[in-house]
Image (cartoon, rainbow, N blue to C red):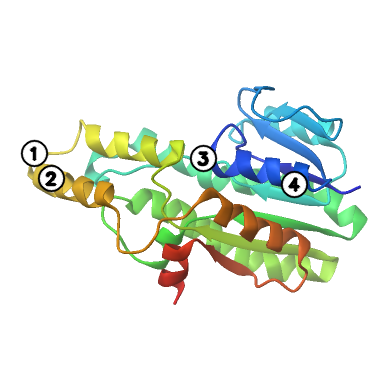
Amino acid sequence: MKTILITGCSSGFGLEIARHFLARGWQVVATMRTPDPTLLPESERLRILPLDVTDPASIAAAVAEAGPLDALVNNAGIGWMAPFEATTPESLRQIFETNTFGTFEVIRAFLPGFRARGAGVIVNVSSSVTLLPLPLVPVYTASKAAVNAFSECLALELAPLGIRTQLVLPGRAPGTRFGSNARAIMSDAPQAPADYAPFIASALEGFNAGSDEEPTRPEDVVQAVWRAVTDEDSPFCQPAGRDAEALAG
């Protein structure tokens, strides 16, 4: 029986990915900062572990508790929508610590196990905002673009060891807690100079109205991750959702 560990399972994509793999007979290690056993169905194949991807001690404890893995899905992340000038140095570092360095350090911690077995797959969930420049998300986009470049290089580095690296790029998902949190940040933007106010209002209106393309559904991301993990011939980079696919061309 194969085992997968997924980060960021308290809501959104991570929670649905965990449910999907559990329903298909995998052993699932679902991690979140504050474990909540009510989120997932009871199963002997399920373990819910605490994991803060910005805390080295928390990562080490999760590695020790999880044991050998066949797949690792780095999904934990935080959204941010605000002008760069309204993003404090503290917020900037928090975004990179979670979205970028958190991904790096979780991979670093689990790599010795994958290497010892000469097999495994690492899936990094990034974002389709990296495919098209957009205003109000420069810091978030940069944090995810770094993950993209890292994943491309890592794939070349680990392939000779029998370890696959995959990248999934979800489109916009306004119905998730991730999306609502990001919108709340942009609505607030308390430190933005007044000059930005009309632009922020216009951007919020456009975001809430959506786009001509259907937004990404959680099941789109779930299916992309499933293919990335189970299909050895799946492409390295997979957009997830019609809007992401449109951006990818």
Q: Is mark 2 on a helix, strand or loop?
A: helix
Residue 196's mark?
2
**Tags 1 and 2 touching, CB below 8 Å:** yes
**Residue found 74% across the figure and 74% down from its top:** 233
Q: Is mark 1 on a helix, strand or loop?
A: helix
Whether residue 32 is situated above or below residue 103 in the rendered picture = above
Q: Where is residue 140 in the image (x, y as percent from the top left)?
A: 40, 49
Q: Nearer the viewer, mark 4 or mark 3?
A: 4
Q: How far apart are marks 3 and 2 (CA)?
A: 27 Å
Q: Is mark 4 on a helix, strand or loop?
A: helix
Q: Where is residue 54 in the image (x, y as percent from the top left)?
A: 58, 34
In-image side of 219 versus 91 (left or right): right
Q: Nearer the viewer, mark 4 or mark 1?
A: 4
For disc 4, the marked residue is 21
Q: What element carries label 3?
A: helix
Amino acid on which disc 3 is placed:
Glu
Amino acid on which disc 2 is placed:
Tyr
Quadrant location, the C terminus? bottom left
**Residue found 87% across the figure and 30% down from its top:** 44
Q: Where is residue 231 in the image (x, y as percent from the top left)?
A: 76, 67
Whether residue 189 is situated above or below residue 75 in the rendered picture = above
In-image side of 163 versus 118 (left or right): left
For disc 3, the marked residue is 97
For disc 1, the marked residue is 194
Query: Along the polypeptide, which appears first: circle 3 or circle 1?
Result: 3
Q: Where is residue 186 in the image (x, y as percent from the top left)?
A: 27, 39
Q: Nearer the viewer, mark 4 or mark 2?
A: 4
**Residue neighbourhood size for the residue with mark 4, other residues' Cα within 10 Å, grouped as few (<14), some (14–19), many (≥20):** some
Q: Distance between the residues labelled 1 and 2?
A: 5 Å
Q: Distance between the residues labelled 3 and 1?
A: 29 Å
Amino acid on which disc 1 is placed:
Ala
